[in-house]
Image: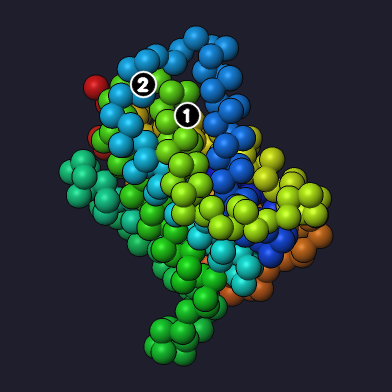
Amino acid sequence: MLAFSMLVAGSFSLGGLAANEIAPIALNFVRFVLAAGFVAFMGWASGTMRRSDFEAPWRYVLLGGLFSVYFVLMFEALKTAPPVNTAVVFTLTPLLAAGFGWILLRQRLGAWSALALAIGGAGAVWVIFRGSFEAMRAFEVGRGEAIFFAGTVAHALYVPAARLWSRGASPFGFTLGILLGGALVQGIVGAPALMATDWAALPRVAWITIFYTAFLATSFTFTLVYFATLRLPSAKVMAYTYLTPSWVILWEIGLGQGLPPATVLAGVGLTILSLGILLGTPDRGGAPAA
């Protein structure tokens, strides 16, 4: 999950540069197809995929659809919201995943874990409202942040749903099923955008983002999350998302975008505090799924 947070952070920063260059659903359809090809090759080369991995294909359509909602809304949000802001909104995932984990799997949180999620949520809310109590009272939310919150809900629901519907599938088989399911959903919904995209005229940053998100921020992270969801409670799996804003800040500096405002840094500080508390609490419900 540490590797997950670092790889995901790169998609925020690169996505911020490419979001206005290509329709989000077109970008994500191509990344899902490329990632599916890569995972299929890795699964074939490793000899770990089984025919039984692809039973009940409806679950892959549903899980792939959830992740498609998250990714498409992420790039839509990055058209107007800064990458660090969206990364902090992403840190609401553990809190939301804890709620869905209780609903679907009856996973319970300890007092310290609940405190950590509350602190992290407070940091995210602080950034969503731009560090303004007046904006909180008026419920003034940035358009990009509001769009990405909806995507974050979809991502949080995916975490316990993946554990519920894994059915003992191999990591490569399960990941491939989700990628194919997501590509199917996006291909149907996004057909007009795909046809309207001038692929030959896309700038370099768009292609860099497509390949990075396909092979690093999709193929690897799907497998990493699947591995973790079978061994950790849903909330703790996503605890490492609290590091994502810090990674994004480093990515932004590396890409020459500079530091975010002090109000955002305050929210990032709260997310780091939450991570420390969560990782210091004992696991609950983290045994591998049968």
Label 2 crowd (10 A; few <14 / some 14-19 / many >=20)? many
* Relative image position of residue 174 (x, y in whole percent): 41, 28
Q: Are marks 1 and 2 in contact (CB under 8 Å)?
A: yes
The reply to whether residue 91 is visible in this rendering is no
Q: Residue at x 70, y 48 (%)?
A: 209
User: With 280 as the anchor, is 34 left or right in this view?
Assistant: right
Give the residue at x 46% y 90%.
134
Number of marks present in the image shown: 2
The colour mode here is rainbow
Query: In percent of the image, x 39 and y 88: which residue is there?
Result: 137
Viewer-closest of 192 and 121: 192
Secondary element at tag 1: helix
Q: Earlier in the sequence, mark 1 or mark 2?
A: 2
Mark 1: which amino acid?
Leu
Give the residue at the far top of this rendering: 47
Q: Is residue 150 above or below residue 60?
A: below
Which quarter of the rendered picture does the C terminus lie within?
top left
Comparing 5 with 199, the one in front is 199
Q: Position of residue 69 (x, y in %)?
A: 45, 54
Kind of residue at badge 2:
Asp
Question: CA separation, marks 1 and 2?
Answer: 9 Å
Label for residue 15? none
Of helix, strand and loop, which one carries label 2?
Answer: helix
- Residue 91 vs residue 38: left or right? left
> Residue visible at 34% across and 43% down?
62
Q: Nearer the viewer, residue 151 or 197?
A: 197
- Indicate the position of residue 63 as horizontal and vertical percent values: 37, 42
Instruction: Give the residue pinned by disc 1.
Output: 176
Camera sees residue 77:
yes
Residue position for label 2: 53
Instruction: Give the percent coordinates (x, y) of residue 50.
Output: 39, 14
